[in-house]
Image (cartoon, rainbow, N blue to C red):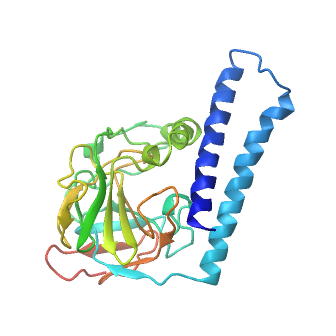
Amino acid sequence: MSMGMRTFTAVLQRLLVLYVFVQVVAGFFVVLPYPYWAGWIPIVAVLAIGFARRRAARREIVADPPAPVEVEPPVTGRWSALNSPADKVPSHGTHSLGQTYAIDIVAVPEEGPARPAFAWLWPVTRRNRAFPAFGAPLLAAGDATVVHAEDGRRDHLSRNSLAALLYFFLIEGIGRTVGGARGIVGNHVVLDLGEGTYALYAHVERGSLTVRAGDEVVAGQRLGGCGNSGNSTEPHLHFQLMDGPDLNVARGVPFSWRGIGVPGGGETFTVRAGAVPVP
């Protein structure tokens, strides 16, 4: 699928999702001026476009699989991987927003407060400071140019209980999807690593960024702090490489962290500050 077609289908799909959302809300207050069956047309169209985009992405991966790009780890300390491309591709169940080879990581330090476990009943939510990942430094994965940086969105409370998770999937997640890519990734930074490769850091802590668009950064330089903005259940880093800076049309690119590789889900790894990372 060409870049132009990616852009067109992405915009069309977003507009249709917005229309479906408005249609559902309006249906609670007024009688819609068309037959019930007609309301399903945009829903079917959204599903059809999504299917076509996923199929095109799969064909491209099979026909011309991209080679992994080795970059520096974006954090230091002890972390654990979630939703890793080492386990499945696409790692997050979708090729959209360049997420094919994305990874989520959470901090699990050997010393100090532990990462809170999932709560079935109570507490419903937790404050971000309860999670060791919150505020952890995010580091440039290589010498790069900052092409986008924003950190004005709030860090919401955690969604790591049964009740909060249901709210996250059934209400909040739908609203963020309608809001587009920025609503999903929250505060984020995009780096141009050169040679057509871009790195995305999502869910950055509000007000933590030390860089702005146009800045030149070097590998290991602090970009900001790990946060809990956007479509996030707890403070963590969502990291991915892409073939372009526009999340709506970019294709995912496989990564490999120097000295670590690609940790699988549940696998812990340690990156020592100023030293060679060790698995």
Residue 146 in the figure: left or right of residue 251: left
The image shows residue 20, relative to residue 213, as above or below, that is above
How far across and how far down the image is residue 85, in percent?
50, 72
Asked if 185 appears above or below 146 in the picture, the reply is above
Q: Which x, y percent locates residue 199? A: 36, 66
The picture quadrant where one finds residue 109 is bottom left
Which image quarter holds the N terminus? bottom right
Residue 78 image point, x, y percent: 26, 68
Residue at x 74% of width, y 40% of height: 42
Q: In the rendered image, which quarter is residue 170 located in?
A: top right
Q: Residue at x 25, y 44 (%)?
A: 129
- Please tell me which residue is depicted at 54% across the width and 43% down the height of the picture: 177
Q: Nearer the viewer, residue 62 or 103?
A: 62
* Depth check, front residue: 181 or 112: 181
From this view, report whether residue 90 is shown above or below residue 156. Answer: below
- Residue extending farthest to the front is 4
Quadrant of the snapshot with the C terminus:
bottom left
Outermost residue toward the left? 274
**Residue 111 falls in image quadrant:** bottom left
